[in-house]
Amino acid sequence: MTGQRPAGLPELPKTYRARNLLIWAIGFSLAIIGGSIFGWYSLDAHIRDRFNNFQILTLIVIGLVLIGFMMGLGMSVVVADEKGLKIRNAISIRRLHWDEIGEIQYRHGDPWAYAMLAGTEDDPVRRQMIGIQTTDKDRAHAAVAELRALHAHFRGR
């Protein structure tokens, strides 16, 4: 963007993260790690000796998959720039240009914000933005207001 930025628009690129979701993901990940270590050493030595390497590796892989899934969700992010939005939800990444977005939707009762695709009014297509969570309350409302202002600004060109 050249020249001065209109009042009310954030500096770009702007990143939005779900703070509470990240805190919960880290907490549960630490609980899995701590619980696994505590559980393993709570077993009698003769019971631990009955586990073979494949079984131990399987348990470790299951724990890592659970942690990876939770951290993937916790690291969900929405990045706004002059071109549009980059939305990373867990392991999927989508790039939406401003002209592809019909509106930024965030209704009462929605778990997160949505980018509604333009031209899909008869059969709406919504892209989840897990990086903007209802649990973040005022932060989520402010993020949606900024995204709506950016959308209006860049669609108005």
Image (tube, rainbow, N blue to C red):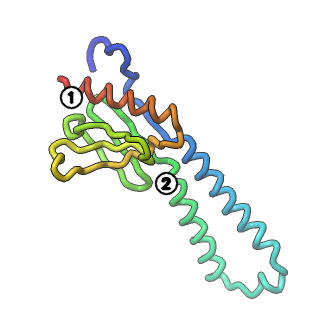
Tell me residue 34's x, y (percent).
Answer: 73, 61
Can you say whether 14 is above or below 69 in the image? above
Tell me residue 12's x, y (percent).
Answer: 37, 26
Residue 71 image label:
none
Instruction: Inspect this view and state whether residue 56 appears.
Output: yes
Instruction: Inspect this view and state whether residue 13 appears.
Output: no
Quadrant assignment for the N terminus: top left
Tell me residue 130's x, y (percent).
Answer: 43, 47
Can you say whether 58 is above or below 28 in the image? below
Residue 72 image label:
2
Question: What's the residue at 32%, 25% (across, down)?
Answer: 149
How many numbered marks does the figure carry? 2
**For the residue carrying disc 1, how many other residues have a C-alpha within 10 Å: few (<14), some (14-19), or many (20+)?**
some
Can you say whether 81 is above or below 9 in the image? below
Question: What's the residue at 26%, 42% (across, down)?
Answer: 96
User: What amino acid is labelled 1 in the image?
Assistant: Arg
Tell which circle, 2 or 1, labels the residue nearer the N-terminal end: 2
Name, please, the residue furthest toward the front.
Answer: 108
Question: What's the residue at 50%, 32% (across, down)?
Answer: 139
Q: Which is more foreground, mark 2 or mark 1?
A: 1
Question: Residues under labels 2 and 1: Cα distance?
Answer: 31 Å
User: What amino acid is labelled 2 in the image?
Assistant: Gly
| Residue annotated with mark 1 | 155
Tell me residue 76's x, y (percent).
Answer: 46, 47
